[in-house]
Image: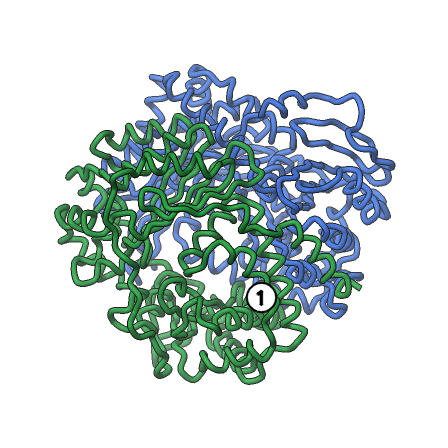
Chain colours: A green, B blue
Amino acid sequence: MIRFLLPLLLLVNVSAFANMASQGTRATSAGIDVVTYPTGVKDVVVIIGAFPAGDALGEGGNITIPTLTGMMLDRGTKALDKFAIADRLENVGAEISFIVGPQSLELHAKCLKKDLPLVMGLIASELRTPAFPAAEFAKAKQQFMGSLQESLQSTEGRAQEAFGRAVYPQGHPNRPHSIAEYLAAAKTASLDDVKAFHAKYYGPAHMTLVLVGDVSAADVQTQVGKAFDGWSGGHDYIRPAQPAVATAASEVTVPLSDKPSVSVVLGQATGLTYRDPDSLALRVGTAVLGHGFTGRLMGTVRDKEGLTYNIGAGVSQDAIADGAWDISASFAPALLDKGVASTRRELQKWWTDGITDTELADRKQGLVGGYFVGMSTTGGVAGAILVAIQRGYDLTWLDGYPEAIKALTRAQVNTAIKTHLDPAKMVLVEAGSVKPAGGPPPAAH
Amino acid sequence: MNHRVGSPLRRIAAGACAAFIGGVVLSAAAMAAAGPAPAPPAAAPGFTFVKSVGGIDEYQLDSNGLTVLVAPDHAAPVVTFQVTYRVGSRNEVTGTTGATHILEHLMFKGSEGFNDPKGNSVKQYLERVGGQFNASTAVDRTNYFATIGRDNLDGYIAIEADRMRHLWLHEADRQSEMTVVRNEYERGKNDPDSVLMEEVTAAAYEALPYHHPTIGWKSDIEHVPIPKLHEFYDTFYWPNNATVTVVGDVDPAAALALVKKYYGAYTRSPQPIPTIYTEEPAQTGARRVVVKKPGELGTVVIAHKVPNGRDADQPAIEMLDAILSSGKNGRLYRALVDKGLALNAGSGTDLHRDLSLHSIYASLAPGASQDQVEEALLAEIQKIKTGGVTQAEIDRVKQQYIAADAYKRDGTAAVASEINEWIAVGDWTLYVTFPQKVQQVTPADVQRVANQYLNEDQSTTGWFVPVQPGAEKGS
């Protein structure tokens, strides 16, 4: 009975979110691609933005410079030192933060409507006119190196790092550097390098700014225009000439002492960006295998066999360049071999036989329903808009995504799985207290 | 499920910029609504209207004592439904530690009316409608929740109500889920700071059951028998030991009717819900613990027991923590992070139904020693004890609470989550009134609570000392 009712119930919710694209406004202001999206929330404004200033742009020079440049933004501008900036924000409960990723510098901010001019002004001055004080650079380097040192002990982080280095070739923008490489490079990073990177790559040319909440397009355009007037420059994202391809299976072990849980990643490069015709079909198929508690992996490896607390599958890093597909999981050392064998069994079955009509129908409903639930907060809306634009869509994708999901057929999904993945070519990474080759087995539970 | 086994009210886990539990100040409309209302705001046959505070209406289901909180919010066509059971790891004893949490896992194995074979289990239903759902266990409560489209509320309440009294509790499920929980335990042990905090907590509490970790001791996780879990379920999973919270795009009368439709069939518990009569003896001197494990950088934590979460001194302690930890102007940032002693530093209180635990902590920067960092943390406490705090510092935190009031209205799940924690502490209305009380805090209040509670003889100090792999054994 519940199954019978669901399509109807879902339609009710979908109608409540109809014509989302028409509620947003997209325009260029001071050279920046600005999206304004009013919602029902009162007084709150959420801002997220991004432009190409990520790690990939550090290739060929000191690889730590993009991150160190991002870390310097809130450490003083030509007009205000870092404590004065903090004062202005903290006195009104506003927040601004910057994150450097593989391709982008992302900014995240939140404030009350009345404080938007203040916050927009601070964002602009931090991006445009950082002071780069030498004393602050020394502190940033110390904190960056300390964070790197700490991350050496993260089984999940180390497994993902090894996986990325195994599946992406040298020069690919998604290929991570090792922590050891970062630590070595940080020692020689200079403030002049940071200033040069800022001058070369920071600018409005490929910047997107999304404001969601209690906002009006006209007001936002005025404020962005005023805060960023006269700013110029900017660099496009790096798009590889050739996508990464899976070649041969391999196994990588990252030994870490005294870790009662081993982090495992199994996967490959897909060669696909999000806009490739098969990409959405592969995502839906992947959801059947590894999303949520009803995904096949959780349903078997966890629920039936009790081998892990957490296992799932996903497609990643395909918004701008071609990405990767992986299963990630954790296992006790004594259950590692069994857990990996069960994971491979489910993967092989899924790849060989594909998904069923019922699985596809259920997953389509879940993905569409979850999409709308996710759009019920300003942060959810802002994130969806930014990623849509980074993937190369316009605002119509907000309405187009659910329709594209609904239109997928089982044949499309199963063909995408077979075409773009091959279990025989996947990389297996195990990070933690893994038994050494030829050594004694880990203690049994 | 993706269980959280620590209270989100713990603020120690965040960096130097973290301070808040989502602190709020009543909006003008909410202020107007505060205080007892003369009549129920929704027609609710079968319910007794209890009170209305800050736009949240409390009812009690007459037939069985179930508490129901309704907070309409029509910003988006979604609703968060949550049931909070007033049972947590505080209700466990030696041999059953972790039982509350294992039972929470088993709550997803099916009930008589809703289960995998029927194709309508809680996870099948909620994932089919795109719900965001989970459950979590903490020291004073266990909660189950989902954010869903408003039209899916009926279906979810039916499932949630069924598993309140008709849960499947099978030995085969316990066996397979035990190893799942054990891996959750093992994942926690990967993190030296998590191990350190567990040992500090165990040392700080001698008698109160907060002594043991919510996830339980490993041997108890592995061996707790299914009859014990049955006993736990039959003791605590009753409507008179639960609070239902409904936040979102609902008509209150219709929501209450659904609650009555599905929960109204149950009676009150046949026996009174057991209470905890254990009291923590007075601490008679400073305590210290050291954790040595492979790692890179050290950590220092200084913990003090402070009053329960409902206590009148808690708003001043909250203000103290915000002044210490909030942003670059927080005192700990200036004294430790900015001076190169720590990568991050903070303070916060894990609010409990009984004695809470306050912690001030720092993650060491490369080259810094535990001695240096402990001394710096103690110096900051001492400065407040002797010199107090400034009115400007107080005013800044109050402004941050005003902004936080607006931010918290963005999304139903966050509202339900915070209400859940105040239910656990013992008074949901603190969700509304606690921020008001923070607005009344004075510099003298902050100095007083620092002197009253942050004393050396009442402290438990923990160090994480990283060692080279292999050196931890017998060092």
Residue B132 in sight from this viewpoint: yes
Is label 1 in a helix, a strand or a loop?
helix
Location of residue A106 with respect to B247 vertically, above or below: below
- Across and down, in percent, residue A25 comes to 47, 45
Q: Residue at x 24, y 58 (%)?
A: A57
- Nearest the camera: B39 or B67? B39
> In the image, B119: left or right of A51?
right
Mark 1, Cα crowd under 10 Å, few <14 / some 14-19 / many 20+, is: some
Question: Which residue is painted at 66% across and 76% down in the image?
Answer: A357
The answer to whether residue A345 of the structure is visible from this angle is no
To which quarter of the image does residue B29 belong?
A: top right
Query: Disc 1 residue type?
Result: Ile
Q: Which residue is mark 1?
A: A405
> Which chain does the residue under circle 1 lie in?
A
Quadrant for residue A48, please give it: top left
Name the image quarter holding the N terminus of chain A: bottom right
B445 or B381: nearer the eye? B445
Side of A426 relative to B126 (left or right) = left
Residue A21, percent across and down?
53, 51
